[in-house]
Image (tube, rainbow, N blue to C red):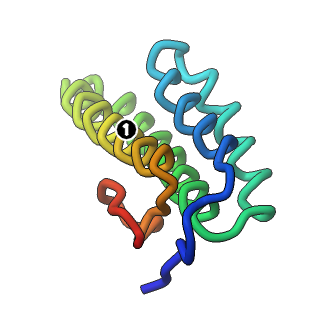
């Protein structure tokens, strides 16, 4: 297991912005998701430690959200898509809220490449 947080994050403003943009994506029709994804991809190479773990976590969240949204759309004919979208909403909110709370505390994500909700990296 890779530990990304050797100490608390120094700043993390970009990380917090990316979380907020992702959360806002649900009310902006996804426009802020694209902006957040671009910021995350641009900043991930410049960061270390806790900030890097959050950006990796967010990039994985964005691409998974996109894949599940497309699957949900493609299965709307069978009404399965509504169920997929409902699960996506719950999963996305849980990941983003928990990640944002950890970022506000200055901690990294212990396993940013996981499918689950963020766990504090001491």
The kind of secondary structure element at disc 1 is helix
In the rendered structure, the answer to whether residue 39 lies left or right of residue 17 reads right
Q: Residues within 10 Å of mark 1 (few under 14, many from 20)?
A: some
Pointer 1: what residue? 97
* Tally of numbered discs: 1
Q: State the residue at coordinates (30%, 41%).
A: 94
92 or 1, nearer to the observer: 1
- Quarter that holds the C terminus: bottom left
Query: Against 5, is 62 above or below?
Result: above
Left or right, 75 with reference to 68? left
Picture quadrant of residue 80: top left
Left or right placement of residue 31 versus residue 41 in this view = left
Relative image position of residue 97 (x, y in whole percent) = 37, 38
The image quarter in which residue 13 lies: top right
Where residue 109 sits: x, y (%)?
45, 63
Q: Position of residue 84 (x, y in %)?
A: 25, 35
Q: Give the image quarter of residue 78.
A: top left
**x and y, in percent, of residue 48 in the image:** 69, 69
Vertical side of 120 occupied by 4: above or below: below
Question: As rendered, which of 69 and 41 lies closer to the eye?
Answer: 41
Judging depth in this view, the residue of 9 and 36 nearest the camera is 9
Closest to the observer: 60 or 45? 45
Quadrant in which the N terminus is drawn = bottom left
Residue at coordinates 56% horizontally, 71% vertically from top-left? 7
> Which residue is drawn at the image coordinates 19% and 30% (left, top)?
83
Residue 17 lies, with reference to residue 58, above or below; the image says: above
Q: Note whether 88 is above or below 5 in the view shown.
A: above
């Amino acid at each position: 297991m890779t530990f990304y947080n050797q100490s608390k994050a120094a700043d993390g403003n970009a990380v917090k912005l990316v979380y907020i943009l992702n959360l806002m994506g649900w009310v902006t029709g996804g426009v802020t998701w694209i902006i957040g994804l671009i910021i995350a991809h641009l900043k991930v190479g410049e960061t270390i430690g806790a900030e890097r773990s959050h950006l990796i976590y967010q990039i994985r969240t964005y691409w998974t959200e996109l894949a599940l949204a497309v699957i949900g759309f493609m299965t709307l004919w069978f009404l399965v898509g509504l169920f997929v979208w409902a699960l996506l909403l719950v999963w996305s909110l849980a990941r983003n809220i928990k990640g944002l709370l950890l970022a506000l505390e200055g901690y990294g994500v212990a396993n940013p490449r996981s499918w689950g909700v963020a766990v504090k990296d001491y």
